[in-house]
Amino acid sequence: MITSGLIQALLWGIASGCVYILLATGLNIIFGVMKLVNFAHGQLLMIGAYIAFTVTSALGLNAYIAILVAMGAVALIGVGLERFTFRKVLGTDKLNEIFISLGLIYVFENAAVLLWGNTPQQIPSPLKGTQLYIGQIAIGYDRLLAILIVGVILFALFLLLKKTKIGLAMRATSQKSSASMLMGVNIEKVYIFTFALGAALAGAAGALYGMIFPFDPSIGALPTIKAFAIIIIGGLGSIPGAVIGGLLYGIAENLAVYLLGGIWQDAIAFALLIIVLVIRPTGIFGERGE
Amino acid sequence: MQKKLVIALIAVIVIITAVVASWQLTQLPSSEARPIKIGLVACYEKAEGQDMDRAAKLAVKEINDAGGVYVRDWHTKVPIELVIVDTQDDTPSKSVGPVTRAIIEDEVDLLIGGYTSAGTLANQVVAIEHRVPYIITGASTSLVTRRGPQGNYGGLPDGDTRRIEDAEGMSYMFHYCTTTADYSKTVVKFFAEEMKPLLDSKYGFDSSRKLRLAILYRDDAFGKGVAADTKALIQSYNLPIEIVAERSYPTTATSFQTDLTAVKDASPDAVYVVDFIANTAEIIKEGQRDVGLNTVYIAVECCEDPAFYTLLGPYGHEQLLESKFAPYAGPPYYLASIENYVKKYQETYGTLPGMMGADTYDAFYIAKDAIERAGTLDKAAIRDALESCALDQILIITETGKIEFSTGTNYHEIAPVTFVEQLIWNADVNECRSVIVYPATAPGVGKLKQADFVLPTAYAPGSP
Amino acid sequence: MAIKKAFANSFSLVKSEVADFYRSQKLYPVIITLIIAAIMPFFVSSYVISEVLTPMIIFAIYASSWNLLASSGQGSLGHAAFLGIGGFTSALLTIKLGLPSIASLFLGSLISAAIGVLIGLACVRLKAWFLAMVTFGFSVIIVTIFSEFDEFTGAIMGFRTPLIVERGIPFYYTALVFSAISIFIIYLIMKSKLGLAFRAIHQNELEAKMIGINTAKYRLIAFVISTFFAGLAGGLYAQSIQYIQNFIFAPYYSFLPLMMSVIGGLGTIEGPIVGSVIIRVIDSYLPSLDSALDGLLHPLFPSVSHVGPPLRMLGLGVFFIVIVIFAPKGVSPLIKKAYNYLRSSPKEKKHDER
């Protein structure tokens, strides 16, 4: 029984899925190249949202320009993180990366509370409130624009990875870091750039998220889990996998909420994750499995 | 003969004087007199906890400025010393410690406060064990006074995991707050008595048509409790209301569009939103702005707070709020004591008071009255005095016009009157302000209703 | 026959381990700690006993259980699930089935270990990050499960837990005994061949496999033992605050044993204990600075009315990262150094004189 509500939920699923895609792709790139997993990635999204919020409310910038500002700022933060925390433990016990991520979660969340407070905010989007009506179905213009922007960013990313020198270096490093080192690739530079890129994508995801949903310092945790679920479903290290996984995830989440009730919103990420990990540990597009 | 008479007279006068003088001497202020320590159990991380703190300090200052509380045993007035018991985030593990410290190390005479149901159920155990009177001004669950052994005063049956066997200890618990049944009672009656006739006449519905109600609630004890109470009350009062949608979402949710779409599909006449300030405001906004669910929304009383009005903005216009304390519905206020309180609070703190502070403020006066009638700081005597409280209502209106703790099945609860307000956009302050639309009257107040309920301009009823 | 032999083997093993321990240097600090713990109640108020010391001791068990699991390379981010399972099952068994509290405490731990087997099976072949995600995910899902069956579990509103012994001093000593025995058992395991296998797997799983260690089996064993003790800690903790509710599954309780172990000293036996003491002291006494901090720092942070908690958490996060980067062995080596210095001072002096 296809009701208009169902289609509406589906369309929203695509829109929120796009935000998750950006986040998951950033995480994927960092993992692919550096073999590093950052559980605090969602907090970068949260910081991106707050930075975009600050520049729009304090400086009156247009929300869409704020996306670029957020990307740049979070990229810088990413560089700092890579240099001062993750680099120190890269190569040591794998558990250390997990520990650093956890510490960073505490740091980012509470720094955000101190700087901006706990009350939920939203980034005022110039298109807020306007809808495109297809019959009974309403979809906000801001969501459609978000889907478009994500598409643009992904396309730019594709060009970067396939056509530029640094992209080549990244792809080489992701396949065999020792071999690429021998070929003269400056691993350190690649790592810094990769982390910055991943962070920038998270920042963009945050700025878009902040336009669609209200946010507060604690919203970083769930998107991280969803990003992981997407990466695992799509296959760790596979970018097309993340795209399809993200869309599927967004749709599944919204449909589950619509059909089963809101309480499934969070649990569904884990349920999917566990199911996929048990059935097919390498993910749907499984490239590099575990 | 006369000489003897004179001597006898003088003797009598001397004896009477001596007796009177010695009696007077015993009435001097006792050297044992000390300030009364009252612990305020509040969650300082939340705005409501800060509101309780401000209200408490206001009450204590008023009482102390007037000399304090008269303790008959000591023949003097003593001041109240406020002991802050900060339960941090009010989860059971964090709230038990501070209350334990207050009782054992600070040696409080009385406790006032409580915020969440789970946190209060956990931290009251210490007060029960140590027989410390606890006027609970938070916690919407009636279990806080009704979890003792079953008797003719409420209580739980055998085998219920939540039961506490200590009936004597339970007698020290007093609940000065509305329970979830109190909110829902007014809400459903409002829908049946005020809204349904309006709908029937405006849209030409048959009188046998039931009002279509949707409930959207947060998935925790609070939300579930209200949803369950609402359904139970509709049944027991036999009201012409039909629940067409009942949806819950996790407490961590920040966006509700999908749930609202599902509610829209069910075509309701009204939506009952059960959540706290931030989420309720978001639901009311998203419903109108993003989903096109143009119905009337009613929020629960914990949203009666300045932050709610600010967050709602113009989307609050013509929406409803169930409440028990309405600092925004005036001036002129329905009760003189509210006028004074709001004015003083604003002068002292520069902001309007919220709902939890009102309960707390009253509780301090209830404590003062109990101590004065008990005449001593003996906790058992204070408990007895609380049980026989008959103060006039202060900020919260009651069904009898007096503050009385029941000794029947609603053990140690009061019978508050809750009402429904409608929010009206006020361009002068750039926010909504409220007017009371139901019920028409209340004891001790007289006329309560300030305006008639109107359907929102963009309102569309459910179908059929 | 084989079982008898295995029993005999392990018994003599334990005997030799205990004898080793007896002769080792480690005995003295342990005896001193136990003596201090035993006489503490006479010097502090009952509030400190029940709200500071007892949770400290119980969390030492919890942190040690996590530490054991981490020593096999499995850094669980969802240990709170087992803390909660232990807490709920032990309380429910007593209330619903009328079992004596101590029996339900053990049964609760066994049930926790049984569920640990299930989750462990899912996790044995997973790399560190996946395991972290799955364990965290489990702790989230378990909340939903417990809430769904609320009529049976009472998880949403929570309920009062029955006690083994009276609250206060009797319970303190009971917890102390449980803690000492549990940590000693964990110590024996870590020192044994089992512990060696765990560490080998942690160091380099591939190499361990090549030597012939069945990594999956040992990882599962680590999981089961760890979740048993986590369940035990859960049962005791629920009794110490006399309440159990869904709060116990919160991520905070999953991160707690991790923080304690890392700050105290990951992989060591004293690390989790030291970490538990440090964090408990922070949690109990720093909040009293909150009102002072509010007054001092509010002008700096206008958007937040209550500066204390986020500042404290921020400080903890920074401190934690600093430890991981600069002092990966935690705080206990520093304490060890101090202890050794005090102990060997006269000898060193003599040595220097020569």
Image (cartoon, coloured by chain):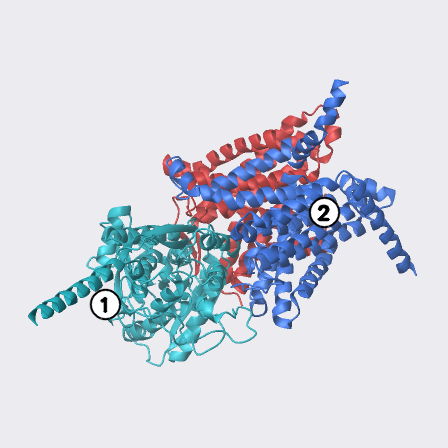
Chain colours: A red, B cyan, C blue
Residue B427, which numbered label?
none
Q: Residues within 10 Å of mark 2 (few under 14, many from 20)?
A: many
On the rendered structure, is A118 left or right of A188?
left
Compare residues B107 and B270 and report the one nearer the observer.
B107
User: Residue A158 appears at what percent x and percent y?
Assistant: 60, 37
> Taking B347 as reference, is C201 left or right?
right
Q: Residues within 10 Å of mark 1 (few under 14, many from 20)?
A: some
User: Can you say which quadrant of the picture contains the C terminus of chain B?
Assistant: bottom left
Q: Nearer the viewer, residue C311 or B276?
A: C311
Near-viewer residue (B419 or C333): C333
- Tell me what residue is drawn at x 87 percent, y 45 percent: C212
Q: Is residue B311 visible?
A: no
Q: Residue furthest top?
A: C354
- Discs 1 and 2 share one subunit: no
Which quarter shows the N terminus of chain B?
bottom left
| Vertical arrangement, residue B409 with respect to residue C26, above or below | below
In the drawing, does residue B335 fall left or right of residue B415? left
Label disc, if present, on residue B448 of the rendered structure: 1
The amino acid on which the numbered mark 2 sits, given as a three-letter code, is Leu
- Look at the numbered disc 2 and give the secondary structure of its residue: helix
Above or below for B67 versus B247 = above
Mark 1 belongs to which subunit?
Answer: B
Q: Is residue B110 visible?
A: yes
Q: Chain of mark 2?
A: C
Query: Residue C297, how many percent across, how many down?
Result: 40, 36
User: What separation in Å lies between label 1 and label 2 (alpha carbons)?
Assistant: 66 Å
Residue B262 located left or right of residue A269: left
Percent coordinates x, y for residue A68 in the rendering: 48, 35
Q: How many marks?
A: 2
The label nearer to you, 1 versus 2, is 2
Q: Position of residue C105 (x, y in %)?
A: 67, 62
Q: Check residue C68 in the rendering and tell me which mark sits there, or answer none.
A: 2
